[in-house]
Image (tube, grey):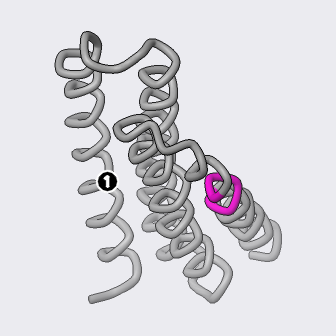
Amino acid sequence: MTSERLFFAIGSFSAFIAVAAGAFGAHGLRSRITPDLLAVFEVAVRYQMFHALALLACAWACTKWPGTLVTTAGWLFVAGTVVFSGSLYVLSLTGVRWLGAITPIGGLALLAGWLCLAIAAIRS
């Protein structure tokens, strides 16, 4: 499978999960977890959706500026979403606070992905 098709598929699936998680948070969690943990869950959903869209942009960018930087950006968005949003989902659902310590690693991956995508655009 080509990078553009793979990133488009992963981005679409990630957006699907973000919409489902958002609905779950709004309807299933509101009465079950504290407002501060619900806010954490909502941040996870928001960043997952933003970076699902970023993966769609990477799929498009693979067709315009093929190369290592765009592919690296896509994989950084995938890894960053898993670590950033994933750790926040688990933290909000379990209350295990130490998971918040790994969230910034996911954030750094997301930042690096955006930087790679910007450099790819500038260099093309």
Q: Does residue 5 show up magenta in the picture?
A: no
Q: Residue 29: percent from the left, percent from the top?
A: 25, 21
Up-down: is 18 above or below 78? above
Identify the residue at horizontal 73%, vertical 73% (top origin).
120
Q: Which residues lie in the magenta part?
A: 102-106
Residue at (81% x, 67% y) in the render: 122
Q: Nearer the viewer, residue 25 or 69?
A: 25
* Residue closest to the eye, 103 or 67: 103
Quarter that holds the C terminus: bottom right
Q: The residue tagged with tag 1: helix, strand or loop?
A: helix
Q: Which residue is mark 1?
A: 14
Viewer-nearest residue: 33 or 70: 33
Left or right, 41 with reference to 23: right
Q: Residue drawn 48% across and 44% down? A: 96
Is 95 drawn above or below residue 87 in the view shown? Answer: above
* In-image side of 81 versus 8 (left or right): right
Q: Quadrant of the image for the N terminus?
A: bottom left
Q: Main secondary structure of the magenta part?
A: helix
Amino acid at pointer 1: Ser
The x, y position of residue 40, in whole percent, is: 51, 29
Mark 1, Cα crowd under 10 Å, few <14 / some 14-19 / many 20+, is many
Q: Position of residue 87 (x, y in %)?
A: 49, 52
Q: Is residue 43 positioned above or below 94 on the image?
A: above
Location of residue 97 in the rendering, given as x and y in whole percent from the top left corner: 57, 42
Report whether 104 appears left or right of 35. Answer: right
* Number of residue marks: 1
Give the quadrant of residue 117.
bottom right
Q: Going 59% across and 71% down the picture, which residue do you hit? A: 76
User: Which quarter of the figure has residue 121?
Assistant: bottom right
Q: Is residue 57 above or below residue 19?
A: below
